[in-house]
Image (cartoon, helix red, strand yellow):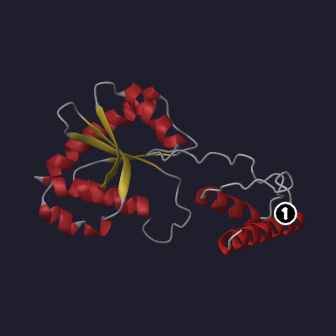
């Protein structure tokens, strides 16, 4: 045998001994726990559950679903449907800013009512030709009556634009017939406001 063959046999023997020793010191494949790949989202959720002190056995219970992002809350939705029932031939817009209504009258009015920026009314009732009949607000009565309330400030601002404000209370929503009567009164007030403006 030549020198090359002897060195190859010696290296193979050494490798075999090293593998045997390593196998003896390491775990068998059956004893190695399977690795799990965890997404960053699941890992963050697990950390969040641990942060709030949930028992590890219960931390994978489904969380309650987040409520849908809605334009109108339950009371406002109920009033919206009653408004439609009371005035089927009229158009109702929801969540309209007072500053937008002032801008319809011109830049001068918008500038004059710039303090109402960010304030709005729950509903605007329009005729079929989109002329404004009334603004409708759904709110609780103000507890502090020492100075002018936000509701009264809104009423005066809208009145200066020729728009009557009707306020309903969430715990005392009127039926469709009472709403029709309120709107009829608002139409009369609107005509009076417009006559006073000119």
The N terminus sits in image quarter: bottom right
In the image shown, does 10 or 96 lie closer to the viewer?
Answer: 10
Question: Against 183, is 113 above or below?
Answer: below
Q: What x and y, as percent, mark residue 163?
A: 26, 49
Judge whether 70 appears above or below 54 on screen. above
Residue 104 in the image, given as x and y percentages of width and height:
17, 53
Do we see residue 79 in this rendering? yes
- Compared with 2, 142 (above or below) is above
Residue reaching furthest to the left:
198
- In this rendered view, identify the residue nearer to me: 123 or 35: 35
Residue 140 percent coordinates (x, y): 53, 53
Residue 106 quadrant: bottom left
Q: Say whether residue 160 is visible.
A: no
Q: Residue at x 89, y 64 (%)?
A: 24
Determine the secondary structure under disc 1: helix
> In this image, 14 relative to 110: left or right?
right
Image coordinates of residue 94 in percent, x first then y, are 36, 44
Q: Residue at x 68, y 71 (%)?
A: 2
Q: Residue at x 13, y 65 (%)?
A: 108
Residue picked out by circle 1: 23
């Amino acid at each position: 045998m030549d020198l090359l063959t002897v060195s190859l046999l010696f290296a193979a023997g050494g490798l075999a001994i090293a593998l045997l020793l390593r196998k003896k010191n390491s775990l068998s494949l059956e004893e190695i726990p399977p690795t799990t790949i965890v997404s960053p989202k699941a890992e963050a959720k697990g950390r969040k559950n641990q942060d709030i002190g949930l028992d590890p056995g219960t931390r994978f219970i489904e969380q309650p679903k987040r409520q849908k992002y809605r334009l109108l809350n339950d009371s406002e939705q109920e009033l919206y449907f009653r408004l439609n029932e009371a005035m089927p031939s009229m158009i109702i817009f929801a969540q309209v800013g007072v500053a937008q209504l002032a801008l319809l009258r011109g830049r001068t009015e918008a500038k004059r009512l710039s303090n109402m920026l960010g304030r709005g009314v729950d509903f605007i009732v329009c005729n079929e030709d989109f002329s404004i009949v009334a603004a409708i607000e759904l709110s609780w009565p103000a507890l502090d009556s020492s100075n002018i309330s936000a509701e009264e400030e809104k009423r005066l601002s809208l009145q200066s634009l020729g728009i009557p404000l009707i306020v309903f209370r969430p715990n005392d929503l009127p039926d469709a017939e009472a709403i029709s009567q309120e709107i009829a009164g608002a139409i009369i007030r609107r005509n009076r406001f417009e006559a006073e403006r000119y």
